Amino acid sequence: MGINKLLTACRLSGRVMAEFEQLPAHLTEQPHLFSMEDLLRVKKGQFMAQARALLHSAIDHVENCELCLARGFICEFCRERDIIFPFQRDACKRCPGKH
């Protein structure tokens, strides 16, 4: 599950979802599809700035929202108290308890 789907399921994510809605729909529905305008924005350095800001805002919401935190998981290997989410694909790869 991507962070966008997690936010869509959260009734308190209105501000962050409004930011996602400012992106062209093809970027959230088909993440490997880019328009020529998207590629020009990448070349100008505008695309990454917007993507980073949106990701930071989304992660900040998830980490501070009780409803989103309730959809997280605890690592089955190390049982640390840190809550992890499916969009954090590296989390268990870095887990010191994984054998």
Image (cartoon, helix red, strand yellow):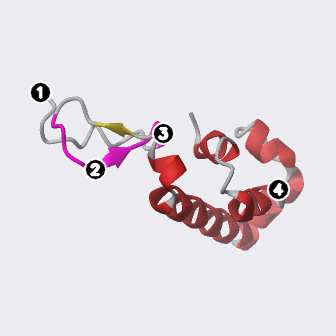
Tags 4 and 3 touching, CB below 8 Å? no
What is the CA distance from the residue labelled 4 to the residue labelled 3? 22 Å
**Which callout, 2 or 4, points at the residue further toward the start of the chain?**
4
What is the CA distance from the residue labelled 2 to the residue labelled 4? 30 Å
Question: Disc 3 on helix, strand or loop?
Answer: loop
- Tell me, yes or no, whether the highlighted magenta stretch contains residue 84: yes
Q: Nearer the viewer, mark 4 or mark 3?
A: 3
Q: Which residue appears at 53% of the width and 49% of the height?
A: 67
Q: Which of 34 and 82 is in front in this view?
A: 82
Q: Nearer the viewer, mark 4 or mark 1?
A: 4
Mark 3 residue type: Arg
Mark 2 residue type: Asp
Mark 1 residue type: His
SS majority, magenta: loop
Q: Name the residue under label 4.
A: 21
Spot occupied by residue 79 in the image (x, y as percentages of width and height): 18, 37
- Tell me, yes or no, whether the highlighted magenta stretch contains residue 5: no
What is the CA distance from the residue labelled 4 to the residue labelled 1? 41 Å
**60 above or below 8?**
below
What is the CA distance from the residue labelled 3 to the residue labelled 2? 13 Å
Which quarter of the picture shows residue 58? bottom right
**Which callout, 3 or 2, points at the residue further toward the start of the chain?**
3
Q: Which of 52 and 2 is in front in this view?
A: 2
Tags 3 and 1 touching, CB below 8 Å? no
**Which callout, 4 or 1, points at the residue further toward the start of the chain?**
4
Q: Mark 3 points at which residue?
A: 71
Mark 4 residue type: Glu
Q: Which residue appears at 87% of the width and 53% of the height?
A: 36
Q: Residues within 10 Å of mark 2 (few under 14, many from 20)?
A: few
Q: Mark 2 points at which residue?
A: 82
Q: Which of marks 1 and 2 is in front?
A: 2
- What is the span of residues highlighted in magenta in the rendered image? 78-87
